[in-house]
Image: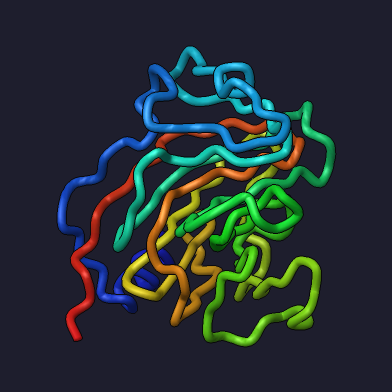
């Protein structure tokens, strides 16, 4: 937690309002499923007895909010189940601007990776851009910027926390309170929020968004 506090302080965090629950713990209001073939979201996501969300992980695609957002702190918690093949793969999508585009599946957006062993990597998808140099070749099929530090994930079956700051054209993220990535001059810098489905079942809980004061220039 000490690292998270330092991380938030370095970017001048200032909440404009209290957090709101993006997932209400009762139903799937405010969410849609973008996938091929088209599938009823209720067939893929089930509300659990404790108010979480069990996600089948397929068909390949993504859950997306019906609303768009800019300048916020996003918090969510996820865990892999023992039923997931290893390494399980998913990610949090921010600034979803259009799609599907890449491979007729993925939208223009940024992905904060939650794949086992690589949580905290940051991927510009389908033409999204940031200023920092990529860790992969510019023409790589899956371009990414590697996380800053060592693996900070928890073992399979335990809950991991993800905190993402989107403020103006900056994106920064931490995994379990450890600052893992930061990019600037992001384009786009607003859009829907999503959760990637890559064929691996997982659970979600405590999906919360707190608006931030915009940067003054």
Along the line of sight, the residue nearer the viewer: 60 or 103: 103
Q: Residue furthest top?
A: 49
Question: Residue drawn 49% across and 75% down?
Answer: 182
How many numbered marks does the figure carry?
Answer: 0
Along the line of sight, the residue nearer the viewer: 216 or 174: 216
Along the line of sight, the residue nearer the viewer: 180 or 62: 62
Looking at the image, residue 140 sits to the left or right of residue 45; the answer is right
Q: Position of residue 92 (x, y in %)?
A: 55, 51
Vertical placement of 131 versus 112: above or below? below
Q: Position of residue 146 (x, y in %)?
A: 67, 73
The answer to whether residue 123 of the structure is visible from this angle is no
Question: Residue drawn 72% across and 50% down?
Answer: 104
Image-quadrant location for residue 149: bottom right
The C terminus lies in quadrant: bottom left
Vertical placement of 55 versus 111: above or below? above
Vertical placement of 67 versus 150: above or below? above
Looking at the image, residue 11 sits to the left or right of residue 216; the answer is right
Q: Position of residue 28 (x, y in %)?
A: 44, 23
Looking at the image, residue 74 sits to the left or right of residue 14; the answer is right
The N terminus lies in quadrant: bottom left
The answer to whether residue 145 of the structure is visible from this angle is yes
Question: Residue drawn 63% across and 50% down?
Answer: 100
- The colouring scheme, among rainbow, by chain, secondary structure or one colour, is rainbow
Q: Position of residue 23 (x, y in %)?
A: 39, 31
Image-quadrant location for residue 211: bottom left
Question: Residue drawn 40% across and 68% down?
Answer: 189
């Amino acid at each position: 937690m000490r690292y998270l506090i330092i991380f938030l302080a370095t970017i001048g965090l200032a909440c404009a309002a209290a957090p709101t629950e993006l997932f209400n713990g009762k139903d799937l209001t405010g969410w849609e499923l973008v996938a091929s073939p088209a599938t009823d979201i209720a067939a893929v996501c089930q509300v659990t007895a404790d108010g979480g969300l069990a996600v089948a992980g397929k068909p390949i695609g993504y859950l997306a909010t019906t609303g768009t957002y800019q300048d916020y702190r996003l918090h969510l918690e996820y865990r892999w189940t023992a039923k997931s093949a290893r390494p399980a793969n998913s990610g949090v999508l921010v600034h979803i601007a259009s799609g599907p585009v890449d491979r007729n599946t993925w939208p223009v957006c940024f992905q904060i990776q939650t794949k086992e062993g690589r949580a905290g990597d940051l991927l510009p998808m389908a033409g999204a851009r940031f200023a920092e140099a990529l860790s992969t070749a510019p023409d790589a099929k899956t371009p990414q910027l590697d996380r800053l530090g060592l693996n900070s994930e928890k073992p399979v079956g335990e809950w991991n926390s993800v905190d993402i700051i989107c403020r103006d054209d900056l994106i920064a993220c931490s995994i379990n309170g450890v600052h893992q990535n930061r990019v600037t001059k992001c384009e786009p810098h607003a859009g829907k929020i999503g959760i990637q489905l890559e064929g691996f079942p997982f659970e979600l809980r405590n999906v919360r968004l707190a608006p931030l004061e915009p940067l003054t220039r």
